[in-house]
Image (tube, helix red, strand yellow):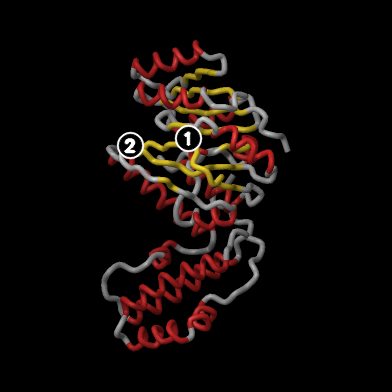
Amino acid sequence: MTDPEKLSVLLPVYNTRSDWLTVAVESVLNQTYREFELLLLNDGSTNPDTLSTLVAFEKADDRVRLIHNPKNMGLPKTLNRGLTLARYDWVARMDGDDISEPQRFEKQIAFLKAHPDITILGTNIHTFGETHEVCRFPEHHKEIAAAMLDHCALTHPTVIFRKDQILAAGGYPSEYPNAEDYALWTKLVLHHPEVRMTNLQETLLRYRVNRSRPEYVKSQADSCHRIRVAAFAALGVPEQLLPYFAKPERKRISGKKLKAYEDALCHIFSALQRQPFFIDDLFRERMLSILRKAVKRALPSPYALRRAGSLLLRREAYLDSLFPRRAPTKPAADSLYSK
C-alpha cells in the first residue's frame, strides 16, 4: 500500500463568500505539512469576488491548481471530476467555508503511516458560526459502520482517503443532494467491507454552521432518510419497520403496538447480526432503550405489565428471548447500490 507522502486536496467552490473562502484556503496553504497540491474546483461560479479570489490564490502559490467546470455541475460530479484530476493517490477534502487547524494534515498522515490498514480517516470538529461545540465521532471502524445506519459518522471536510478505492466504488453518488458523502460512506460499509474507516480522536477542523438555508436543510434531510431506507432495504429490512427502530413518541400505545415493536426489532436485530460491522452489545442496548420507552407508553395494558416485570426481574432472559446471541456471519452479496 502506498504511503500518503503527498496529498491532493479537493476544495470545491460555488459562489462562496470571498472572506470565508480566503480563510479556508489560507488554512490549507499554512499547514505544517506542505507536500500537497490544492485543487480549487470552481463549479461555475458567477460571483466576481469569488472568481478574483480564486485567481489570486492560483497566482500566489504554485501548489494551487484552479480548475473550472464548463458549467455548474453540482457537488458530487465536481468531486468526482476532481478525483480523476488529482495527481496523488491520497486525497484530502476541504470546504470553502471551514478552517483546518495548522497540524491537521501532519497528524492525519502520521496516523495513516502508522495504521496502513486504514483507508478513510476523519477527525472530530469544533463548530462555529451559529453554534459553538466540539463534536466527537466514533473512533473504530465497526462503531462508525454501525452508526451509519442512523447518521453520518464521518465529517466530510475532515477526511483523507485513498483515491483508488473511492473510484473503484463508483465515486460519489449524485442522486442524494447535500448528502453525497453519507451516501458514499454507507455504500462502502455495505458493499466494500475491505474499506476501513477511522476517526482520529483530535479536533482538527473548525466547521462553519450556517442554518439560514432552509431549502438546503430540507433537501439534506430528505436525502438522509432515503439513504437509510436504501441501507436497511439492502439488509433485508423493509421501510415499514424503520419507525420501530426509534423511541416511540410521547403518546399512549396499545399492548398490541408494543408487541409490534418487539417483532419489528427482532427482525431488524436478526438482519443486523449477519453484517460484519455488527456489535452485539451496542445493538442490544439500542433495542433495550427503545423497548423501555415502548413498555412505558403501553402501560397499564396487561401485556405491557408482564413485559415491565420481565424487564425488571429477568432483563437478560427477556433480551435473550428477543435478541438471541449468535456469531456474526459473512454478509450476503447484496449491495446498496449497483455498480
Position above or below: 205 against 152:
above
Position above or below: 300 against 240:
below
Residue occupying image coordinates x 47% and y 41%:
180
Question: From the viewer's perspective, is 33 left or right of 266?
Answer: right
Q: Amino acid at mark 2?
A: Gly
What residue is disc 1 on?
A: 76
How crowded is the residue under tag 2: few (<14 C-alpha within 10 Å), some, or many (20+)? few
Which type of secondary structure does the marked residue at label 2 adopt? strand
Which type of secondary structure does the marked residue at label 1 adopt? helix
Residue occupying image coordinates x 56% and y 45%:
200
Q: Where's residue 12, x and y in %?
A: 46, 28
Position above or below: 298 against 157:
below
Q: Where's residue 77, x and y in %?
A: 49, 32
Residue 177 appears in the picture as rendered: no
Report how far apart the C-alphas of labels 1 and 2 lie in the structure. Answer: 25 Å
Query: Which image quarter is the C terminus in?
Result: top right
Query: Which image quarter is the N terminus in?
Result: top right
| Nearest-to-viewer mark from 1 and 2 | 2
Q: Which mark is residue 129?
A: 2
Q: Where's residue 336, x and y in %?
A: 54, 52
